[in-house]
Image: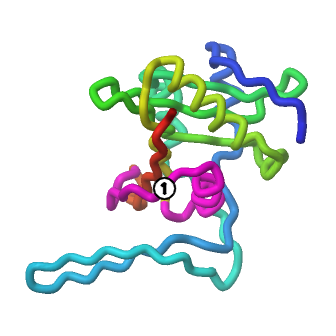
Amino acid sequence: MPQIEIRPAVSPDIIELINLDHSCKTSYVWQMDRNINEGQFQITFREIRLPRPIQVPYPRLAEALEDEWQLASGLLVATHEGKLIGYAKLSEIKEIHSVVIKDIVVDSMIRRQGVGTTLILATQNWATQRSNRKMIFEMPSKNFPAIKLAFKLGFEFSGYNDSYYPNKDIALFFSKFLK
């Protein structure tokens, strides 16, 4: 695993962060099935293997990222040897003492080397220091690598929102209580 440093983002980081590859590659997705009968609604998600790997585009508009980052409660960046290799955008919901990981992006050249895990653990520290009791991790249903990361780090599936993103993708929510 590379030596990774986590720090709050500063203004000069913005251009480099925008230029990171925000897409992901996957062979699996979570497919939503909806069954509605009289007085009963049943929503299920199932993991399906795709016939071939696909490149999943980022669900947010690239031109809106800088404005969204200005409104974020926190923006943590991961660096390796002085180069930005990833970030986590955080939204704090003080009324429910929770932090939402709105985005987590790792440079495609260094994925699957622990950077995402390190960012999530740094987010957990950030949330705990601010007296939050819960973390919520948000991702599109097509971002299977993020789903696997959520389970690996002890998050549990806690809900979804249909047509949540600007591209109309389904958002999945995973949550974890902090100690």
In this rendering, the answer to whether 120 lies above or below 56 is: above
Taking the view exactly as shown, the residue that stands out farthest to the left is 38
What's the residue at 36%, 28% (across, down)? Answer: 97
Q: As drawn, is 76 to the left or to the right of 67?
A: right
Q: Quadrant of the N terminus?
A: top right
Q: Nearer the viewer, residue 66 or 137?
A: 137
Which residue is labeled 1 in the image?
A: 156
Q: As drawn, is 84 to the left or to the right of 23?
A: right
In this rendering, the answer to whether 101 lies above or below 71 is: below
- Based on the picture, tell me whether residue 157 belongs to the magenta stretch: yes
The span picked out in magenta is 141-165
Q: Nearer the viewer, residue 54 or 120?
A: 120
Q: As drawn, is 57 to the left or to the right of 139?
A: right
Q: Quadrant of residue 10?
A: top right
The x, y position of residue 80, in whole percent, is 85, 28
Residue type at numbered disc 1: Glu
What's the residue at 35%, 53% (across, down)? Answer: 164
